[in-house]
Amino acid sequence: MKTKILGVVLAGALILSVPAQAVYANAMDENKVVRVISSFSEHWAKEAIHKLTEKNAFLFDEELGYDIAIKKSEFAKIICVALDININYLVQPDIKDYFDDIDPTAPYASYVINLVTANVFEGGGSFKPDDNLSREEMISYLMNAYKYKMGEDYKMIKLGEPSFDDADKITPEYSGKVSQAQHYKLVLGNEKNMFDPQRNASRAEAATVVVRLSDLLASQNIQVAIKPEATVKDNSIEMKITIKNDSKNDISIECTSSQRFDFQFLDAEKNILWTWSANKMFMQALGTIEIKAGETVEFSDTISEDEYAEFKDKIVYFRAYITGSANFIDQQGYETELSK
């Protein structure tokens, strides 16, 4: 039996509070200037900010803070860099062919060109790079980027109206994309279940939804084959579970103890006859299983005839578990009939 699991999204809540600002300092490391985050431990968007800072995805000066409204030009770089929207042209288009108010030498011009080519932005007229983005506009561009990144794998999902309590205030042309974003948990309401569509999006909010989309795309592109096997030998049963990373990205499994797997035998009614871990002790310790792209990890053990003599004639099914956590793991285990 071969099981292929497509990762699912695990997204956190969007907390719309305004804690302390992030403060940065410069440091030298092998003659390179690097940004060192000295203090933003209280900021609700700290994880997203950290990820985008590592990618150098901000067009603005981080010292000015993340709780101020984001400009359209600033969002262009964040979404391009974070989602790796980098188009190779035979001849680079002229930004003036798209917008009449962007200087070709502007630091955001190339990002805007890429986003127009990717149909994230619609070219024509004025771009208004210094204008702020409303939250509904930001989500509209975000879902355009999702469609571009998914390519042929993009599927239009039929959804109803967003379930926010102020959904009636969303501009009709944005409503469908807000529903999509809510479905994928890219954006959530505040504690009062309000989306606040016309309010200006902050830099922190933009960072958060873009990182969530990046994580969503990564999880949807993960293909992991997990296969359980149990084969009866002359006087034993060989038990095995194999994890094959068929994706182009490295994957990891987070563990909370030294246990990495578990095995069970079941009867015809799927009652548990025997559990591998039942009489074993495991250390409580955090650990990570790393599996590089294209690589396979296997966990196995053997049960002797003396051990399974009492239930030998009752065994019908074998069930295997990965005891760590990852978005591609089925916590209910992987089951197959016993090979004889």
Image (cartoon, rainbow, N blue to C red):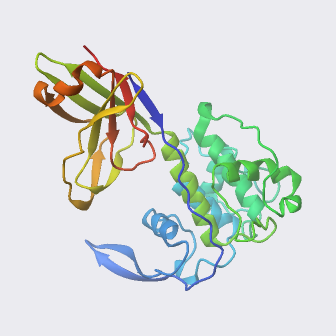
Instruction: Point out the image quarter for the N terminus.
Output: top left
The reply to whether residue 84 is visible in this rendering is no
Position of 107 relative to 95 (above/below): below
Picture layout, residue 108 above or below residue 240: below
Give how far across and how far down residue 261 sits, in percent. Answer: 27, 42
Horizontal relation, residue 270 to residue 234: left or right: right
Query: Residue at position x 20%, y 27% from top?
Result: 310
Q: Quadrant of the C terminus?
A: top left
Q: Position of residue 330 (x, y in %)?
A: 44, 40
Q: Position of residue 108 (x, y in %)?
A: 61, 62
- The x, y position of residue 164, in whole percent, is 78, 60
Left or right: where does residue 212 sit relative to residue 120? left
Residue ID at (20%, 34%)? 300
> Is residue 289 positioned above or below 51 on the image?
above
Q: Is residue 332 visible?
A: yes
- Does residue 319 appear left or right of residue 284 in this picture? right
Looking at this view, name the residue that lies furthest to the front: 310
219 w.r.t. 189: above or below? above
Residue 243 in the figure: left or right of residue 17:
left
Closer to us: 172 or 228: 228
Based on the displayed image, in which of its 4 quarters is residue 294 positioned? top left
- Total tally of numbered discs in the picture: 0
Foreground of the two, 147 or 186: 186
Q: Name the residue: 28% across, 25% down.
A: 229
